[in-house]
């Protein structure tokens, strides 16, 4: 069996804390399945700037280009967030990675584990059974358009929101394909009542829909969508949207899943893909050892499914997470009121539980 090469970009803040857990879960999967994984660490973000002066060193990009899959933690540090004048910034590393590897399709599943029905600030009866798949365009839109700069006198600034038909078409096709294998609904979210790019978006998405007659397409303005997500999240199946709208709506949707610490994502290109929790470096909890590692661990499940051709193992990871939650274990972000102290876990302990359950579930299957 050939080795699978996994590049680990731990990044900043809680990034290294949660990727350590995710990597160890993948190691356990290796033990269980016999698949060999070869891990290689590389720098990105603030830690890369500290070491090399650049947020995405060429050496990192070279390693990523050779990888079967990439596991990413998070980038970002308050020293830049609080310094608008900083020219070199950690987030540039992430954006350059996405652009260089052409990771145009960011897939963000929003699923609530039943065990967490009471962890969300939204009423359980609104949440039960929610299953949304976001397709966020990731390599264009306002994140990448030019010009993007401060005026010479410093009194104004410009960012550019641009999309080409092809950029919209390729992400739309992915969304329709996924919908045709799910509940056959695509809701395309835009701001076509104001933005020319959104009118182009709507036109192309409507065109693509003709190739998928079994899928029902609806369009929704982003302001309404942000409200509908909380009012009645079960109305959505696949949500298709642009780069910035997708960024904002999925942070909002994390509250449906109980916490930012629960949402995994896959950023997919044609050659290779990056698997990353949707959350950031969380400077407010970094170094405390209390971050929820489940988003990173569930990103490993996506990796097993989408890049490594190991869907059974992906299900095992998801099942292990569900089992640990149904045993009542919680990190602080998903802890209900009145949780007994022995059920309250830190990052390492949560990860240990998932690994223990993975091994236990496997031995149960083997002995049957
Ligand atoms: N993909 C990425 O690398 C990424 C994503 C978002 C933000 N960022 C960067 O991260 C930094 C902080 O940004 P922010 O505070 O707006 O967003 P954030 O996602 O880092 O944190 C938002 C809130 O969610 C909590 N949270 C996030 N992940 C958690 C986890 N796993 N377990 C428990 N709680 C968790 C944090 O403690 C914080 O209160 C910024 O520099 C930003 O640019 C990076
Ligand atoms: C850090 C930032 C550039 C990034 C984004 O906006 O895409 C993050 O918020 C995310 O959701 O991955
Ligand atoms: Mg974001």
Image (tube, rainbow, N blue to C red):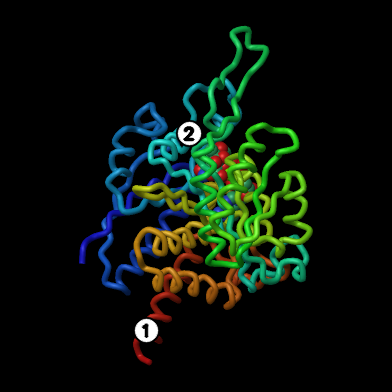
Identify the element where label 2 is drawn.
helix
The relative height of residue 42 versus residue 362 in the rendered view (above or below) is: above
The relative height of residue 221 versus residue 140 in the rendered view (above or below) is: below
User: 338 or 320: nearer the eye?
Assistant: 320
Q: Percent x, y for residue 99?
A: 43, 36
Tell me if residue 283 can be seen. no
Q: Percent x, y for residue 94?
A: 46, 38
What crowding class fits label 1: few (fewer than 14 Cα within 10 Å), some (14-19), or many (20 or more)? few
Can you identify the residue that label 1 sits on? 363
Q: Percent x, y for residue 247?
A: 60, 44
Q: Percent x, y for residue 320?
A: 48, 73
CB of mark 2 near ligand 1 (< 8 Å)? yes
Image quadrant for the C terminus? Answer: bottom left
Tell me if residue 157 can be seen. yes
At horizontal 66% and vertical 66% (from top left) the residue drawn is: 130
CB of mark 1 near ligand 1 (< 8 Å)? no
**Residue lying furthest bottom:** 368
Task: Choose top left, top right, bottom left or bottom right for residue 114.
Answer: bottom right
Mark 2–mark 1 Cα distance, whole angstroms, equals: 43 Å
User: 226 or 165: nearer the eye?
Assistant: 165
At horizontal 60% and vertical 24% (from top left) the residue drawn is: 159
Image quadrant for the N terminus? Answer: bottom left
Identify the element where label 1 is drawn.
helix
Can you identify the residue that label 2 sits on? 90
Task: Choose top left, top right, bottom left or bottom right for residue 222.
Answer: top right
At horizontal 77% and vertical 48% (from top left) the residue drawn is: 224
Q: Earlier in the sequence, mark 2 or mark 1?
A: 2
The relative height of residue 110 versus residue 204 in the rendered view (above or below) is: below
């Amino acid at each position: 069996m050939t080795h699978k090469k996994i590049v680990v970009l731990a990044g900043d803040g809680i990034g290294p804390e949660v990727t350590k857990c995710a990597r160890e879960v993948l190691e356990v999967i290796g033990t269980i399945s016999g698949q060999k994984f070869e891990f290689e660490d590389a720098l990105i973000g603030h830690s890369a700037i500290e070491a090399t002066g650049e947020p995405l060193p060429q050496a990192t990009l070279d390693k990523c280009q050779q990888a079967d899959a990439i596991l990413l933690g998070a980038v970002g540090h308050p020293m830049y967030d609080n310094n608008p004048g900083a020219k070199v910034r950690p987030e540039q590393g992430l954006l350059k990675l996405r652009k260089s590897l052409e990771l145009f399709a960011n897939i963000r599943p929003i699923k609530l584990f039943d065990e967490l029905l009471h962890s969300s600030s939204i009423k359980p009866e609104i949440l039960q059974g929610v299953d949304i798949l976001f397709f966020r365009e990731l390599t264009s839109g306002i994140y990448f358009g030019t010009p993007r700069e401060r005026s010479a006198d410093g009194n104004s600034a410009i960012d550019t929101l641009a999309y080409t038909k092809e950029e919209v078409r390729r992400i739309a096709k992915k969304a329709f394909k996924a919908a045709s294998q799910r509940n056959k609904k695509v809701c395309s979210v835009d701001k076509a009542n104001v933005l020319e790019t959104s009118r182009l978006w709507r036109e192309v998405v409507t065109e693509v829909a003709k190739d998928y007659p079994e899928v029902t397409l609806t369009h929704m303005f982003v302001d309404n969508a942000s409200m509908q997500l909380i009012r009645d999240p079960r109305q959505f199946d696949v949500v298709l949207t642009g780069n910035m709208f997708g960024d904002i709506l999925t942070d909002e949707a994390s509250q449906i899943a109980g916490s930012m610490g629960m949402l995994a994502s896959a950023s997919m290109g044609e050659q290779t893909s990056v698997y990353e929790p949707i959350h950031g470096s969380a400077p407010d909890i970094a170094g405390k050892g209390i971050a929820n590692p489940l988003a990173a661990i569930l990103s490993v499940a996506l990796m097993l499914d989408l890049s490594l051709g190991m869907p059974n193992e992906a299900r095992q990871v998801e099942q292990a997470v569900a089992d640990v939650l149904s045993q009542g274990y919680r990190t602080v972000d998903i802890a209900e009121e009145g949780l007994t102290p022995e059920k309250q876990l830190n990052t390492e302990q949560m990860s240990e539980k998932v690994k223990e359950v993975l091994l236990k579930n496997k031995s149960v299957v083997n002995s049957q």
